[in-house]
Amino acid sequence: MSLTEAPPKARTLNSLGLPKPPRETRVVAAMSGGVDSSVVAAMLKREGYDVVGVTLQLYDHGAAVNKPGACCAGQDIHDARRVADAMGFPHYVLDYESRFRHAVMEDFADTYLAGATPIPCVRCNQTVKFKDLKRVAEDLGADCLATGHYVQRVEGLNGAELHRAADASKDQTYFLFATTRDQLNYLRFPLGGLPKSETRALANELGLRVAEKPDSQDICFVPNGKYQAIVEKLRPGAIEPGEIVHVDGRVMGQHNGVINFTVGQRRGLGVATGEPLFVVKLDAANKRVIVGPREQLGVTRIALKEVNWIGEPVGSEDELNGRDILVRVRSTRPPVPAKLSVGVGWSVLLDAPEEGVAPGQAAVFYDANSTRVLGGGWIMATE
């Protein structure tokens, strides 16, 4: 984790905060084929920027080619190309299937098999999109890389800051916690201050055929929602049956694979009992699904790994110990009060217990008094 100081704020002459006029500013627009990234590219072209559209072909499942809500394959590539043609800027498609499979899909399978719940969108942003695509943009001589994410980038005293989107219902900061300082200085998010309704209105105003296209799904490479089939395809024979065990030690039944369960799950356990039971832990090493009453779900301490800090620069990690923050432990939940614990590793101490906190998910830090994202880490264990 880098705690180095960011470069000083630059004088701004254009809407992207760069020190030269739009016509002299080259922008690589990451285009998934959806309405958000299409509006970003088209809007910047209309403002006079030297726009280059780039689409990454990440996978090509036949079932996903014409499936509404997919991205980065099949029809979506054609949609991105049509937007570029209509607006008059160049568009390139880069084959990143091998990189995506290794960095995202295989990590997805291995995380499930280890008894955790992965977030492939974060891994994709962390590796393929913000790392590899940033390198491509730099090779093309671009001054910045623009995406359609609903987050806000604010120039602060120590460089660029990441903030929550103006439209709280569309905020995507949870999925961008691993963004580095260097990446944040290069990235731009033109939609961060807009509601989704205004984005679609802009798409109609610009005459884009994707104006009413459905939003992409969280897991783009699972075209039918059956992630177990993807895991089985990537790791044949790795899904093994085992026992469903109560927290008091009773064997309640059998299961067909730990990957079919997640912490907090109640439905589909396949065991009959006189009390409501929830999955409280997955013991992949012993092929066990641990179940118990709801009160067993509440956790107050979350141990983290691969922590990324993008808050204010500090001299050492020790300075952050005991800091009051807000933390989001699932993408669908609001941030809640907590404290950082930094010493031998990083932990988050919640002010009140949270239920269904699953290893493999992310804990994202927010400033307690503003919309700023301070960073986050991957959930390793809970107490």
Image: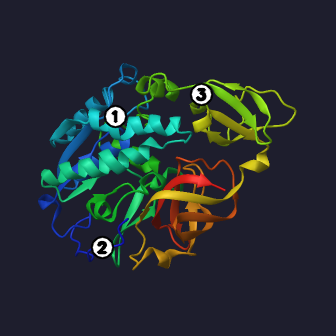
Q: Residue at x 52, y 58 (%)?
A: 304
Label 1 vs label 2, nearer the camera? 1
Instruction: Name the residue tied to disc 1.
Output: 101
**Gap between marks 1 and 2, in whole Å?**
33 Å
Q: Is residue 205 left or right of residue 296?
A: left
Identify which residue is drawn at 26% across, 29% down. 78
First along the sequence among labels 3 and 1 = 1
Residue 288 in the image: above or below residue 5: above
Q: How is the image coloured?
A: rainbow
Front residue of 296 and 214 = 296
Q: Which mark is nearer the camera, 3 or 2?
A: 3
Asked where in the image residue 152 lies, by quadrant, the reply is bottom left
Badge 1: residue crowd in 10 Å (few <14, some 14–19, many ≥20)? some
Q: Residue furthest right?
A: 274
Which of the labelled discs sits on residue 6, or is there none? 2
Left/right of residue 266 with respect to residue 3 in the rendered view: right
